[in-house]
C-alpha cells in the first residue's frame, strides 16, 4: 500500500517549501524536502556588471540573512582585488554579522520554533499564554535589528557596507543607546534560556550526524577564518582551506540526488549553530558555557532539534561579545574613515562565512576591468538539504506504529530546526 | 466595526517584505489585535486558505506556474489586492536584466534540473501583468513606516497613499551633500520614488533605486547628465534596470 504524508506548504519558515513521504507497506520509497521557490538565477544575471553593483543584487537572495550575504559578497570581491580593509572596518563587519545572528536566532528560537513544542500555530497565539517570553524575544530581536541598522544602514537589505569599508560609521550616541539595550538583554538572558530549557522534550529522530562549520580563529565569530572543519559522529575531524570549499560541497552534489537509501554513503552534513558549537566549543565565552549548562546541551548531538538549543547558546555568546565590540568601538572614538580605494584586477576571490543557518560561500571571478564574469554562491540551506532528508529518513523509520499526524509534526519540527531559508536555495536542484 | 480580514502571501522573492512585517516588533501584537489575519504561512501554521479576504498583501514576483496559480486564487478571494515590495510591484531583481536569456541562465545555475521548471513567465514579472492590483507599497524591502501607514489607510478602506516626488527631494530636505553633482557618483535618487527619507545618500551611499520610479521620472535628463560625467550608457541602463525599470520601448514617452 502506498501512502503519502505531505506538507504542501511549510509554515514558519522563510520561502516556499514542502515535505513528501512515500511508503510502500512499511518500506520507505521516497522522502523529500521539496522546494517550490521560483528560479531567479542571480549568479547568471549579474554577469558583466561592475564590482560595486554585485553585493546589492546578490544579497537579495535572502532577507533573513541579507546582512551576512551582503558583507560576504563584499569580502569575496575584496579577496579578488587584494583589498585590505582597516581594523575598524573589520570590527564593524564582525559586529554587523553578529547583530544579524542575534536577530535571526531570537526570531527563530522563540517565535518560529518554540510554538511547535508548546502546541501553538504561531508566536502570536503563544503570546496569549506566554506573553513575557514573546515580548522578551521581540525585544531581543529588535535589538539585533537596531544594531544591524546602526552599522548597516538598514535591517533588511543593508546599504551602508561598501567595498573597502563603510559609507558612514555609526554615531557614538546611537551606539551608547544600543549599549544600554545590550545590558538589558544580558540581564534578561537567564529568563530567555530558562524558557528554552523548559520546552517539553520532544523526540523526532536519533541519528549519527556529520557537522561542518568554519574553524573560528581564536574567537567565536562568524566572519573570520580560513578553514572549514568537518566533525564526524565519532568526533574525528577533517580540515580544509576555505578556498577549497568545493571539496566539501562536491560531496554534497553527489549525495543530494538522495531519494534512495544507498545515498547514505554520500554522507550528508549539517551546518548551522549546532555545527558551529560542536566544532568550536573551546571558543565559547563564559556566557556560552553558562548557557550550555543551563540548557543541558551536549555535543556532538544526535538530534537535529538541538540546533534550536545551540542557537540559544549563540544568543548568549553574541550578546556579550556584541557588548564588547561596542565598547571597543566607542573606546576607539569612531574616527570617520573613507573606504579603502579599490583597484580592480583580474582574478578570483572566495569568502566563506557563517550565516545564522550555517556555512555561506561567495566566490567571484572578475576580469581586468573589474566586471564579474563568474559567480558561485552556496547557501547553508542548499548544504543542509541532504541532511534534512537524511533526518527525515531516520524519523520515518523510527516512527513505527505512530499516526500520520504525529509523523507530519515530527518532520515539520526537523525541517524547522534547521531554520531553512528556502529562498536562499540558489543551488538547490529540485526534483521533478 | 468588525476587524478587516487579511492574508499575507509570498511568491518568488526573498521574503523580505513579509519579514519586515515580523520586524515591527513594537507593533506586532497590536497588529494582530487590529487585523483578523487569516492566512500568513510564514508566521502561522494555522491557515484559512479559502475564506473571503478584505485585503491581500502579496510579495514576490511571478516566475512559476505555481506563483501564478496562487496569485489568481488570492485575487479571486480578495476585495483588495496590494503588491508589497519591488518584486511584486515591478518585477524587482527576478525581473531585472531582460536582455539575458533566462533559459540559458537557469541552465547555467540549476543544471539539467532547469528543464523541470514550470514557468509562467520569461522572467520575474510584476503581479499586475496577471491580475488587477489595487495598490502598491514600494521598496526593497518596504519601509516600516509606509507599511504601518498603509495598514492605517486600509483600516479606513483606502489603498496605500504614496509619495510621488523623488528621493532627491528628501535628500535636499536633509541637506545632504549631493553625491551625483559633487562626487560624480552614479546615484539615481532623482528618478526614484521618495518615502525612505533618502536612506542611502544620507549615509554617503548612492541610491540604487530600490523603490522604483517616481511619478514623472525624467530618465533622459538623468542619462544625459551621467553621460556627461563619463558613464557608459550600458552601465547607466544596467543600474536603472535593476529596480527603476526603464520604460520598455513600446511605452517610451514621445519626445517633446
Image (cartoon, coloured by chain):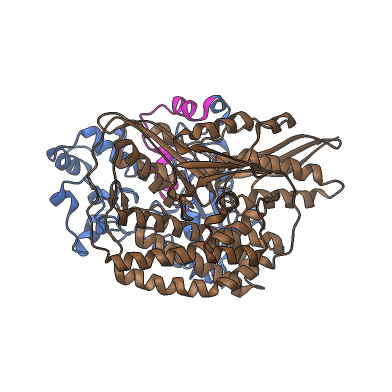
Residue shown at 47%/54% (left/top)?
A: A221
Quadrant for the N terminus of chain A in the image: top right
| Majority SS type along the magenta span | helix
- The answer to which quarter of the image holds residue A189 is bottom right
Q: Quadrant of the C terminus of chain A?
A: top right
Q: Nearer the viewer, residue A54 or B71?
A: A54
Q: How far from the left and from the top, in percent, is residue B111? A: 52, 26
Residue drawn at the location 80% of the way across and 48% of the way down: A404
On screen, residue A181 versus residue A115, left or right, reads left
Relative placement, left or right, of A211 versus A100 is right
Residue B156: x and y in percent read: 47, 68
Above or below — where is B218 with respect to A134?
above
- Report x, y in % for residue B112: 55, 24
Image spot of residue B61 (x, y percent):
47, 43
Q: Of A304 and B82, which appears nearest the observer?
A: A304
Q: Nearer the viewer, residue A403 or A284?
A: A284
Q: Is residue B215 left or right of residue A412?
A: left
Relative to B130, A290 lies left or right: right
Q: Which residues are magenta?
A: B85-111
Number of numbered markers: 0
Residue A16 belongs to the span the image colors magenta: no
- In the figure, the blue chain has which letter? B
Q: Colour of chain A?
A: brown
Amino acid at each position: 500500500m502506498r501512502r503519502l504524508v505531505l506538507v504542501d506548504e511549510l509554515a514558519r519558515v522563510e520561502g516556499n517549501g514542502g515535505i513528501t513521504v512515500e511508503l510502500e507497506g512499511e518500506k520507505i520509497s521516497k522522502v523529500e524536502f521539496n522546494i517550490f521557490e521560483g528560479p531567479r538565477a542571480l549568479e547568471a544575471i549579474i554577469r558583466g556588471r561592475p564590482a560595486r553593483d554585485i553585493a546589492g543584487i546578490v544579497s537579495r537572495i535572502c532577507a533573513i540573512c541579507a546582512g551576512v550575504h551582503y558583507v560576504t559578497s563584499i569580502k569575496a570581491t575584496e579577496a579578488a582585488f587584494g583589498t585590505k580593509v582597516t581594523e575598524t572596518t573589520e570590527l564593524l563587519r564582525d559586529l554587523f554579522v553578529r547583530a544579524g545572528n542575534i536577530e535571526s536566532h531570537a526570531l527563530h528560537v522563540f517565535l518560529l520554533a518554540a510554538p511547535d513544542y508548546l502546541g501553538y500555530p504561531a508566536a502570536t497565539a503563544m503570546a496569549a499564554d506566554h506573553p513575557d517570553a514573546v515580548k522578551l524575544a521581540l525585544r531581543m530581536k529588535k535589538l539585533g535589528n537596531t544594531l544591524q541598522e546602526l552599522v548597516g544602514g538598514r535591517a533588511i537589505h543593508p546599504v551602508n557596507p561598501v567595498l573597502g569599508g563603510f559609507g558612514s560609521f555609526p554615531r557614538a550616541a546611537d551606539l551608547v543607546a544600543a549599549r544600554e539595550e545590550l545590558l538589558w538583554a544580558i540581564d534578561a538572558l537567564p529568563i530567555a534560556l530558562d524558557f528554552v530549557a523548559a520546552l517539553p522534550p520532544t523526540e523526532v529522530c536519533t541519528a549519527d550526524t556529520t557537522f561542518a562549520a568554519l574553524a573560528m580563529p581564536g574567537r567565536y565569530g562568524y566572519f573570520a577564518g580560513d578553514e572549514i572543519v568537518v566533525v564526524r559522529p565519532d568526533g574525528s575531524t577533517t580540515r580544509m582551506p576555505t578556498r577549497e570549499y568545493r571539496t566539501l560541497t562536491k560531496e554534497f552534489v553527489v549525495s543530494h540526488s538522495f531519494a534512495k537509501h544507498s545515498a547514505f554513503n554520500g554522507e550528508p552534513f549539517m551546518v548551522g549553530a549546532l555545527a558551529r558549537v560542536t566544532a568550536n566549543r573551546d571558543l565559547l565565552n563564559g556566557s556560552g558555557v553558562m548557557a550550555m549548562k543551563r540548557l543541558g546541551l551536549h555535543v556532538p548531538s544526535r538530534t537535529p532539534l538541538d540546533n534550536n538549543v545551540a542557537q540559544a547558546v549563540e544568543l548568549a555568546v553574541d550578546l556579550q561579545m556584541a557588548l564588547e565590540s561596542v565598547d571597543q568601538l566607542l573606546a576607539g572614538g569612531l574616527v570617520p574613515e573613507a573606504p579603502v580605494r579599490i583597484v580592480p584586477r583580474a582574478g578570483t576571490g572566495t569568502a566563506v562565512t557563517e550565516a545564522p543557518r550555517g556555512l555561506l560561500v561567495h566566490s567571484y571571478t572578475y576580469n581586468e576591468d573589474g566586471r564579474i564574469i563568474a559567480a558561485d554562491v552556496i547557501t547553508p540551506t542548499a548544504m543542509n538539504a541532504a541532511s534534512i532528508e537524511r533526518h527525515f529518513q531516520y524519523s520515518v523509520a523510527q516512527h513505527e506504529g505512530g499516526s500520520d499526524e504525529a509523523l507530519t509534526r515530527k518532520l515539520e519540527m526537523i525541517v524547522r530546526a534547521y531554520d531553512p531559508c528556502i529562498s536562499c536555495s540558489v543551488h538547490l536542484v529540485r526534483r521533478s | 466595526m468588525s476587524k478587516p480580514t487579511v492574508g499575507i502571501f509570498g511568491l518568488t522573492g526573498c521574503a523580505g517584505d513579509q519579514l519586515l512585517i515580523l520586524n515591527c516588533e513594537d507593533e506586532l501584537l497590536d497588529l494582530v489585535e487590529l487585523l483578523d489575519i487569516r492566512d500568513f504561512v510564514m508566521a502561522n501554521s494555522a491557515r484559512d486558505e479559502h475564506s473571503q479576504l478584505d485585503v491581500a498583501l502579496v510579495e514576490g514576483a511571478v516566475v512559476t506556474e505555481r506563483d501564478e496559480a496562487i496569485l489568481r486564487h488570492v485575487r479571486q478571494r480578495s476585495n483588495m489586492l496590494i503588491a508589497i515590495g519591488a518584486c511584486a510591484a515591478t518585477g524587482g531583481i527576478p525581473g531585472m536584466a531582460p536582455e539575458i536569456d533566462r533559459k540559458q541562465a537557469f541552465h547555467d545555475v540549476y543544471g539539467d534540473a532547469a528543464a523541470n521548471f514550470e514557468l509562467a513567465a520569461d522572467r520575474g514579472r510584476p503581479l499586475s501583468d496577471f491580475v488587477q492590483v489595487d495598490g502598491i507599497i514600494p521598496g526593497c524591502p518596504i519601509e516600516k513606516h509606509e507599511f504601518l501607514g498603509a495598514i492605517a489607510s486600509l483600516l479606513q478602506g483606502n489603498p496605500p497613499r504614496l509619495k510621488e516626488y523623488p528621493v532627491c527631494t528628501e535628500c535636499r530636505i536633509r541637506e545632504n551633500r549631493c553625491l551625483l553633482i559633487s562626487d560624480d557618483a552614479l546615484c539615481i535618487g532623482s528618478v526614484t520614488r521618495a518615502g525612505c527619507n533618502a536612506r542611502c545618500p544620507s549615509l554617503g551611499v548612492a541610491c540604487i533605486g530600490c523603490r522604483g520610479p517616481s511619478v514623472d521620472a525624467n530618465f533622459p535628463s538623468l542619462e544625459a547628465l551621467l553621460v556627461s560625467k563619463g558613464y557608459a550608457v550600458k552601465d547607466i541602463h544596467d543600474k536603472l534596470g535593476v529596480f527603476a525599470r526603464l520604460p520598455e520601448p513600446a511605452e517610451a514617452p514621445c519626445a517633446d
